[in-house]
Amino acid sequence: MIYQHCYLDGSPLDFPVGKVVCIGRNYLDHIRELNNMVPETPILFMKPATALIALDQPIQLPVGRGGCHHEVELAVLVGRQLQNADAETACRAIAGYGIALDLTLRDLQNELKKKGYPWETAKAFDGSCPLSSFLKPEALPEPQATDLSLRVNGEIRQQGNTQQMMVSIFDLMAYISTYFTLQPGDVVLTGTPAGVRPLASGDRLILNLAGHEFTARVA
Ligand code: ZN
């Protein structure tokens, strides 16, 4: 099934499907759980458009590549081009808010990190970014004070609030736009709170963004 950005009511959004720009470490509790250093500047990486799948499609875990972790994250849909933008301009360019999984082949990523290699094969593989439909910006009036959580088979795994981000949503978008022009249809992932674990075949997921529930399942 070909991915298309949609609003919550299922109506398609008139944007192309672009790249996904992500931040590596943006919640302190998650940095601590993986024994990582607190970065001095944001760690950015990208996933291509082929990483995107709709959250209601079955999640296919890569076979024979070690554990695949869930990272639940607030997703921002870019509605206007941003280049060397400031935070205020970035705020006005937002077309919607959703919730995503930054699927990560953790064993592979650990190997790559040890060798000082890039993370792409662990982070940017096909289907590595299951993404929900989007709330209109006015439906999330306080994006920087929003609860997000992930339940797997009924058990709460990740729970956070966007207040806990070290780099705020708008500052992050502005920073990204000094390296990579953000275009309409691009998505920004804003980092994950603690609680990342491997997914398993048959897992049933409930992602919650500000009280909006989205279900997903692992094939
Ligand atoms: Zn992540």
Image (cartoon, rainbow, N blue to C red):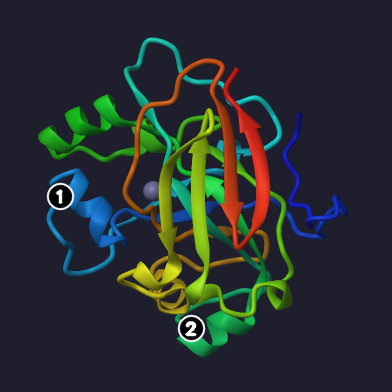
Taking depth in this image into account, of 219 and 81 the one nearest to the observer is: 219
Q: Dividing the picture into quarters, in which one does residue 121 lie?
A: top left
Q: Dot 1 surroundings within 10 Å: few (below 14), some, or many (20 or more)? A: few
> Residue 36 shows which numbered tag?
1
Question: In the rendered view, would you say 219 is above or below 179?
Answer: above
Viewport quadrant of the N terminus:
top right
Rendered location of residue 56, percent (x, y): 71, 35
Q: Residue at x 61, y 66 (%)?
A: 183
Rendered location of residue 17, percent (x, y): 68, 50
207 left or right, relative to 169 = right
Viewport quadrant of the C terminus:
top right
Q: Residue at x 59, y 40 (%)?
A: 206
Q: Dividing the picture into quarters, in which one does residue 52 lie?
A: top right
For the residues marked 1 and 2, what is the alpha-carbon distance in whole angstroms?
29 Å
Rendered location of residue 197, percent (x, y): 35, 32
> Residue 85 shows which numbered tag?
2
Describe the element under mark 2 as helix, strand or loop. loop
15 left or right, relative to 163 = right
Q: Is mark 1 within 8 Å of ligand 1?
A: no
Q: Nearer the viewer, mark 1 or mark 2?
A: 1
> Residue 78 shows which numbered tag?
none
Taking depth in this image into account, of 123 and 219 the one nearest to the observer is: 219
